[in-house]
Amino acid sequence: MSVVQAFLNLSTAFGLSASAGLNAYIPLLVIALVDRLTDGLIDLQGPWVWLSNWWTIGVLAVLLVVEILADKIPAVDSVNDVIQTVVRPAAGAILFAASTHTIRLHPVLAAICGVIVAGGVHAIKATGRPLFSITTGGTANPIVSAVEDLISTITSIVALVAPYLVLALIIVIISLVVRWVVRRRQAQR
């Protein structure tokens, strides 16, 4: 495997894990269906082959419907976010490990990366959502939730079909963070 392919696999893993931070079941369902219905776009191997089993796909679809409905209702969405504090990082760990299996990244390291990425995105989402609820009296919750679901879906698909775009986004984000840190340090002087 080439170095470029390894970076693209890592980009896919980061994209899928970040997507799981918004909605755990969308990227899981996407990779399960893509593995099951296509040839070669993603190849779940070894301990991850169970993800593309029709029973797993059915359970993921039901959980996705429950998640989508629960996340649209004010107050219920807050309870759902508490529950998802465990589910989304776990999904991120599974996605990162399953998508880096081909580059032989140690499964524990992959799982830790997935937990950090999905957990970080979820923490930002769970922190920001109450602000929308309070400032709009809950009326914006369905819209914000639908946008999050759309972003999760698009990110999952892009991570699989165009991982170089995810890599470019990662580079942009790192550049912005470095720039922010440098400016803060300069302002402190």
Image (spheres, grey):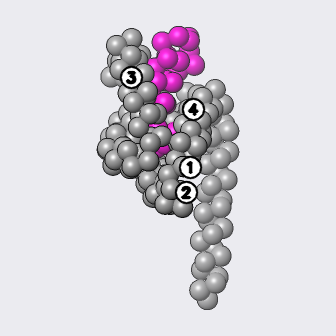
What residue is shown at x 59% (from left), y 36% (from top)?
Answer: 150
Q: Are marks 1 and 2 in contact (CB under 8 Å)?
A: yes
Front residue of 95/84: it is 84
> Disc 2 designates what residue?
136
> Disc 1 designates what residue?
140
Q: What amino acid is found at the position of numbered circle 1 in the picture?
A: Ala
Q: Is residue 24 magenta?
A: yes
Mark 4–mark 1 Cα distance, whole angstroms, equals 20 Å
User: Mark 3 or mark 4, which is nearer the start of the sequence?
Assistant: 3
Disc 4 secondary structure class: helix
Tell me if mark 3 has few (under 14), some (14-19) or many (20+) residues whose alpha carbon lies within 10 angstroms of its own. few
Mark 2–mark 3 Cα distance, whole angstroms, equals 30 Å
Mark 4–mark 2 Cα distance, whole angstroms, equals 25 Å
Position of residue 81 measured from the top left corner of the image (x, y, whole percent)? 38, 47
Q: What amino acid is found at the position of numbered circle 2 in the picture?
A: Thr
Position of residue 99 measured from the top left corner of the image (x, y, whole percent)? 47, 30
> Disc 3 designates what residue?
62
> Disc 4 designates what residue?
153
User: Mark 1 or mark 4, which is nearer the start of the sequence?
Assistant: 1
User: Mark 3 or mark 1, which is nearer the start of the sequence?
Assistant: 3
Q: Which residues are magenta?
A: 17-45
Disc 3 secondary structure class: helix
Residue located farthest toward the bottom when viewing the structure as drawn: 189
Tell me if mark 2 has few (under 14), some (14-19) or many (20+) residues whose alpha carbon lies within 10 angstroms of its own. few
The answer to whether 55 appears left or right of 150 in the picture is left
Q: Quadrant of residue 109?
A: top left
Q: Quadrant of the C terminus?
A: bottom right
